[in-house]
Image (tube, rainbow, N blue to C red):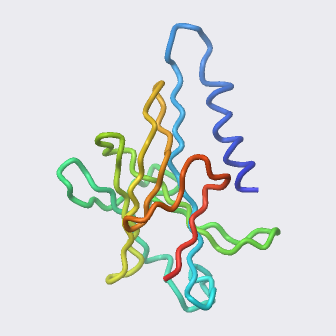
């Protein structure tokens, strides 16, 4: 289901975004990632009934050009704090967190996003982007230095064990 929604969202700008042939008028942005978060016993830590992670305390931080971490807080966006919690669906998927990756500060095709789960637990997400043809498309994602996803993967999903 998430995959179908993703493809629909990607296709819409391509279908409706340009009304002339005067060059580059469209920009495709693919800069989100979904995460399942479990513990070693496979308990869904994003489930509010699990006693795991308090999703209201999660913070997303972007590394800026000065290598400082900046808290994401934009009230004009649906995911104003840089993430959205996705509830389980009919297919039996667990709770997931949709993280909006840092496209504000990309240097040498790379940006850094941090997920602060609690005061003493944070993950670093390094994203390599394809910036060709006026696009911003995630190509590779590392979590804490370990390559976890490449654009050839079928799903925008990474599983984390906490």
Residue ID at (67%, 52%): 154
Q: Which quadrant would residue 94 be assigned to in this image?
A: bottom right
Query: Closer to the camera, 133 or 52?
Result: 133
| Front residue (pair 121, 20) | 121
Question: Residue placed at 32% from the left, 83% from the top?
Answer: 120
Place of residue 53 in the rendered image (x, y in percent of width and height, measured from the top left): 50, 83
Q: How many marks?
A: 0
- Identity of the residue drawn at 58% across and 81% down: 38
Task: Pick whichever, 148 or 93, lies toward us.
Answer: 148
- Residue 72 x %, y %: 36, 58
Q: Quadrant of the N terminus?
A: bottom right
Q: Residue 126: horizontal and vertical position, in percent?
A: 38, 56
Residue at figure coordinates x 78%, y 73% from the top left: 92
Horizontal arrangement in the rendering, residue 134 relative to residue 105 (left or right): right
Which image quadrant is residue 107 in? top left
Taking depth in this image into account, of 136 and 56 the one nearest to the observer is: 136
Most extreme residue toward the left is 66
Q: Is residue 137 above or below residue 140?
A: above
């Amino acid at each position: 289901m998430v995959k179908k929604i993703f493809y629909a969202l990607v296709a819409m700008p391509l279908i409706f975004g340009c009304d002339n042939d005067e060059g580059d008028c469209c920009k495709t942005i693919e800069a989100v990632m979904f995460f399942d978060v479990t513990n070693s016993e496979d308990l869904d830590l994003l489930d509010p009934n699990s006693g795991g992670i308090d999703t209201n305390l999660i913070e997303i931080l972007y590394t800026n050009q000065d290598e400082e971490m900046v808290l994401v807080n934009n009230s004009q966006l649906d995911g104003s704090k840089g993430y959205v919690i996705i509830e389980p669906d009919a297919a039996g998927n667990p709770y997931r967190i949709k993280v909006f990756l840092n496209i504000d500060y990309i240097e040498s095709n790379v940006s850094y996003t941090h997920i602060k789960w609690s005061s003493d637990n944070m993950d670093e997400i390094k994203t390599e982007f394809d910036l060709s043809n006026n696009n911003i498309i995630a190509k590779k994602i590392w979590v804490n230095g370990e390559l976890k996803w490449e654009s050839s993967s079928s799903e925008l999903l990474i599983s984390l064990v906490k």
